[in-house]
Image (spheres, rainbow, N blue to C red):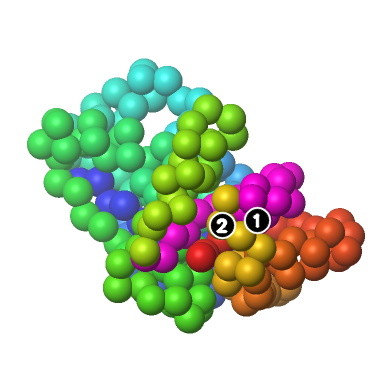
Amino acid sequence: MLSVVSTPIGNLEDITLRAMRILKEADYIACEDTRVTGQLLGYYDIENGGRLLSFHSHSGFQKVDRIIELLKEWKHVALVSDAGTPGISDPGFVLIKKAIESNIVITPIPGASAVLSAIVSSGFDCHQYLYLGFLPVKKWRQTLMKSLQEKKYTVVFYESVHRIEKTLAEMETYFGSETQIVIGREITKKFEEFKRWTIAEIHEYYQWEGKIKGEFVVIF
């Protein structure tokens, strides 16, 4: 069985009792960074016992095949990402897809999600929304921005600290400076903040704020 286990996105208290039980019981834990997962296990006094398998975006097909072999040997593998729910903007979907093709039982262990945390805190209508992950850096970026001009429902995406100012400038161009926007930064962490202003106001805020840190969720 492959258990897809959600882990905290910042605050380590945001983990379910079921997730902790699965991490204790699993024969192996496939994770992006063994150090990050090791810290989570240590925080809850869960024994590592050599069960951690490195599995990240640079892992080749041999690593996927190795985990599938373990699953076919009736081993219980827990799949985790560094933060949040595996398969959402991370390489977990490759393993999940291969496991399904191999008739492996998939069990989701729900929990923390930056997308959902941001959406429900935004105040925008979330009955229907479009999640984009990280925007393309160059190719298709302008085409995507133009297509979003016609959207009548909430749009949400991730952005890095290195690109947030450029993205806000582009959004002013395509959507207008007075468009209402919400940005969630460092969600669930010590310096969590939500800014609910116009694009122009938030852009100016980050320009004057000086050096900014963290990961951003943008909703408009």
Mark 2 surroundings within 10 Å by alpha-carbon count, few (fewer than 14), some (14 through 19), many (20 or more): some
Seen in the picture, residue 134 relative to 168 is either above or below; the reply is above
| Residue at which label 1 appears | 172
The x and y percentages for residue 87 are: 37, 46
The reply to whether discs 2 and 1 touch (Cβ–Cβ < 8 Å) is: yes
Residue 171 falls inside the magenta stretch:
yes
Q: Is residue 129 left or right of residue 190?
A: left
Please, what is the three-letter code of the amino acid marked with disc 1? Glu
Please, what is the three-letter code of the amino acid marked with disc 2? Phe
| Residue at which label 2 appears | 175
| Numbered tag placed on residue 220 in the rendering | none
Which SS class for mark 1? helix
Which SS class for mark 2? helix
Find the distance from the CA under tag 2 to the CA under tag 1.
6 Å
Query: Is residue 53 among the parts visible in the rendering?
Result: no
Mark 1 surroundings within 10 Å by alpha-carbon count, few (fewer than 14), some (14 through 19), many (20 or more): some
Residue at the (24%, 27%) spot, across then down: 69
Residue at the (19%, 49%) spot, across then down: 106
Which quarter of the picture shows residue 68? top left
Seen in the picture, residue 63 relative to 188 is either above or below; the reply is above
Residue at the (84%, 59%) spot, across then down: 207
Seen in the picture, residue 53 relative to 127 is either above or below; the reply is above
Furthest residue in direction left, as rendered: 103
Q: Is residue 206 left or right of residue 50?
A: right
Q: Which residues are magenta?
A: 153-173
Residue 81 falls inside the magenta stretch:
no
Query: Is residue 157 among the parts visible in the rendering?
Result: yes
Total marks placed: 2
Residue at the (38%, 57%) spot, across then down: 151
The x and y percentages for residue 11 are: 59, 70
